[in-house]
Image (cartoon, rainbow, N blue to C red):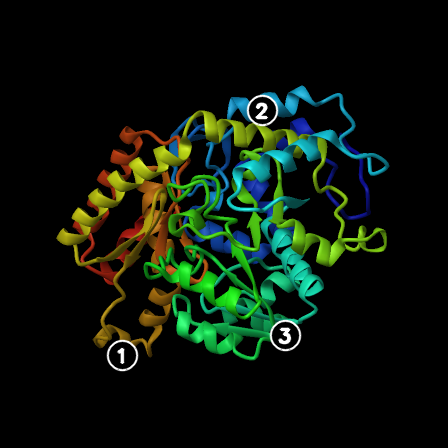
Amino acid sequence: MGRRIKDEMPEFLDLKEAMELSREQNRENHRRFINPELVNLMGLLNFDKCFVRAEGTSIWDTEENEYLDFLGGYGALNLGHNHPGIIEAVEAVKELPNLLQAALNPLAGALARNLAIFTPGELQYSFFGNSGAEAVEGALKLARASTGRTKIVSCEGSFHGKSFGALSVTGREKYRKPFSPLLPGIEFVPYGDAVALEKALAQKDVAAFIVEPIQGEGGIIVPPEGYLRKVRDICTDYNTLLIVDEIQTGFGRTGKLFACEQEGIVPDILCLSKSFGGGVMPLAAYTTTEKIWKQAYGSVEKATLHTSTFGGNSRAAAAGIATLEILYRDDLSRQAAEKGEYLLGRLQQLQGRYPFLKEVRGRGLMIGLEFAQPEKGILNRLTGGAVEKIAGEYLGAMIAGELLNKHRIVTAYTLNNPNVIRLEPPLTVSYEQLDKLLMALDGICAKNKGFGDMVIASSKTIS
């Protein structure tokens, strides 16, 4: 277009030009204007390909090579890429006002009504936002406002987002330390330890306990059976609100509509996002009971204490309504349970054959594969511990790189445990596609006896 916005800046790109950028042009834009070190990290394992088409579990690069997406947008693509039902719903509301704060949006009201029907127990009032972190922020504020208490208890190894409040209850020091001091009054207890939780609540001064039914970024950690039931009882005994973060586990991912239903419990506040917008629109919510909502916001003076400009806009609400309809119509929770049982069983067979595959765990189509760390041998001593350090942070990335570059399967490691590869494909994934993944993992494990082999193999895949 030839138009410059600032001196010494490149030319302005229109949409058509942006869609036709080469891989190197795309890298350069990210390097100069977004995050240069992330460009370096992504390029290290060839994770900066340009993809130009997506449908269901499949994505295609500029050379029309097909890849299988087993990362699924970190659990945001339960319905797959570009589900036609979601695209149709968003298209159907294109002439409606998308943002109009001087009115009550009928689509937001309908979505909240439908969500109240879908969610367990007496959860009824919802607040809509745009991301999981925003849902957590709102839930923490609601807990403080409704109880009059300020303390929050969370779990070690948890992940609830990277905005300030959500980060304050996220249990990995790597993400917290650069931004300290964070919110005061936050305490962490071991995940799965109900006794430790009860001790933390004993003074009856804690507003809320926030917990994931399965820790996603912690490494797909499934708590001991009965843990959530104990948590529910303990929170009730000490008048502490129970916030369940189902941002990653929700909407059928674990074989139930919501993972908390596995143990038949109902939280006081439920946080939702990721797949809520059908993989097309950003959409999040926290939902709670009438009593808790009114304790916090039950007057005209309090009605606008917590708001969001884009929360509950028409296109996002339309996508949410369609998502709930498709989940119910296609019984995707059942599909996740059945396919997950098949995949877990086959992966456990691989684990029995290959010591390199240390552990397989998960529920439904939320599965983690933990790979064995290298022994502290002579190579580690000669490098001053460098091998151990690299393995601790990048072993999962190397395996993900091998899957991507040699088998055209997209995965990633979990943020709080980089030795764990996550498998979170769309719930619509086929058994044939599951078998392709299994064959790829079989091949990787067969030729890699340990970390050293993995380094050599990965280095050959990097371009």
Residue designated by label 1: 381
Q: Which three-letter amino acid code belongs to the residue tagged 2?
A: Ile
N-term mark: 3 or 1: 3
Q: Which three-letter amino acid code belongs to the residue tagged 1?
A: Arg
Label 2 neighbour load within 10 Å: few <14, some 14-19, many 20+? some
Label 3 neighbour load within 10 Å: few <14, some 14-19, many 20+? few
| Disc 2 secondary structure class | helix
Q: Distance of mark 2 from mark 3, alpha carbons? A: 42 Å
Q: Distance of mark 3 from mark 1, alpha carbons? A: 34 Å
Q: Which three-letter amino acid code belongs to the residue tagged 3?
A: Ser
Residue designated by label 3: 180
N-term mark: 2 or 3: 2
Q: Which of marks 2 and 1 is in front?
A: 2
Residue at x 76% of width, y 49% of height: 307
| Disc 3 secondary structure class | loop
Residue 14 seen in this snapshot: no
Residue at x 34% of width, y 43% of height: 364
The answer to whether 7 appears left or right of 281 in the picture is right
Position of residue 201 relative to residue 356, above or below, is below
Position of residue 215 relative to residue 11, above or below, is below
Q: How many marks?
A: 3
Q: Between residues 163 and 143, which one lies in front from this camera angle?
A: 143
Residue designated by label 2: 87
Residue at x 32% of width, y 29% of height: 430
